[in-house]
Image (spheres, rainbow, N blue to C red):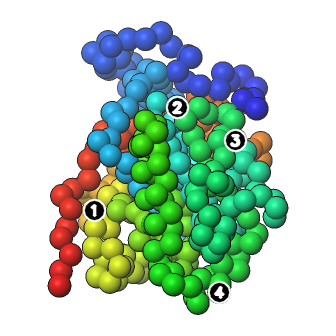
Amino acid sequence: MASTAAGTTGDVTEELPQHDSVDRAEIAAALPGADEQTPLARAVADDARKRITLSGRSVPRPARTRALTVANQKGGVGKTTTTVNIAAALAQAGSPVLVIDLDPQGNASTALGIAHHAEVPSVYDVLVEGRAISEVVQTCSDIDGLMCVPATIDLAGAEIELVSLVARETRLRNALTAYIDEREAAGEPLDYVLIDCPPSLGLLTVNAFVAANEVFIPIQCEYYALEGLSQLLRNIELIRSHLNPRLHVSTILLTMYDGRTRLSSQVADEVREHFPDQTLRASVPRSVRISEAPSHGQTVMTYDANSSGALSYLEAAVELAERGAEPPVIEETA
């Protein structure tokens, strides 16, 4: 199914000859610059630099599986888009990646070209019926090393059904831990698990927070996004206090960034000022290609690998990987 948009090759790794990091940096530095009065020229130059420095780039593999919950209580900030494109970029760079679609809408499954109609075994069966992840996981046909646990419409009723179940908050964590151990025993360890959450703090999102140690927050570069962030951080602190003391915000990615507007720049500056260690240097611009890709059952990484959106997600994935290991384990308090 590895079709691509017209005029693209589907993978930036095929576009340029291999150079070592010094050669790439020298070539990128030699490109002509552009000032603030020429935003289009500046964007073209930035994309060219990214293409030179990132194409064919491998990423360091973590010492152990990193599980990240991609969450934001505000809808429309790019959670699902970020989940699938970061996962695709990491897999293209050689890391085995599992995406868990925990949103009843199943948009992550759609973007990865994964079947998720009502009869398909899904994350609902894992949470409510207690099935193993290995029984429901599917592989992405476009990208080697990328797997997905799909979501079906059955998940819409899972919130109610989970209420009466034993250990309702830890069911995903138990299943995920067993699957990670199973992969390691088989000599096929996972590098990353990315969990796509619904835009709410129900039992599905709580399960995601308990299952992961890291929270990855996409933030839309608009004012209302900042209001939602403060509430999200309070909820994360509640989860830390009662259910998962190792949970922490490790990564923040600015999405839908428009360098032509003062608002985007102000929001970006404010987020970077308050969260300097968590906010990635990379940001993702508004992009038609990113929006078009899911309608073709693809991520933008395969739909148009040379677009500004794909290059930005690739840059963010490389930065995420290079940040590496998690901080020391936080001991539980009595």
- Residue shown at the point (55%, 24%) measured from the top left: 12
Marked residue nearer the N-terminal end (3 or 2): 2
Q: Give the crowd class for mark 4: few <14, some 14-19, many >=20 residues within 10 Å.
A: few
The amino acid pointed to by label 3 is Gln
Residue designated by label 4: 160
Q: Give the crowd class for mark 3: few <14, some 14-19, many >=20 residues within 10 Å.
A: many
The amino acid pointed to by label 2 is Gln
Circle nearer the viewer, 1 or 4: 4
Marked residue nearer the N-terminal end (4 or 3): 4
| Mark 1–mark 4 distance (CA, rounded to whole Å) | 36 Å
- Residue shown at the point (51%, 68%) measured from the top left: 172
Seen from the viewer's position, the closer of residues 225 and 163 is 163
Residue designated by label 1: 275
Residue designated by label 3: 298
Circle nearer the viewer, 4 or 2: 4
Q: Secondary structure at mark 2?
A: helix
Circle nearer the viewer, 4 or 3: 4
The amino acid pointed to by label 4 is Ile
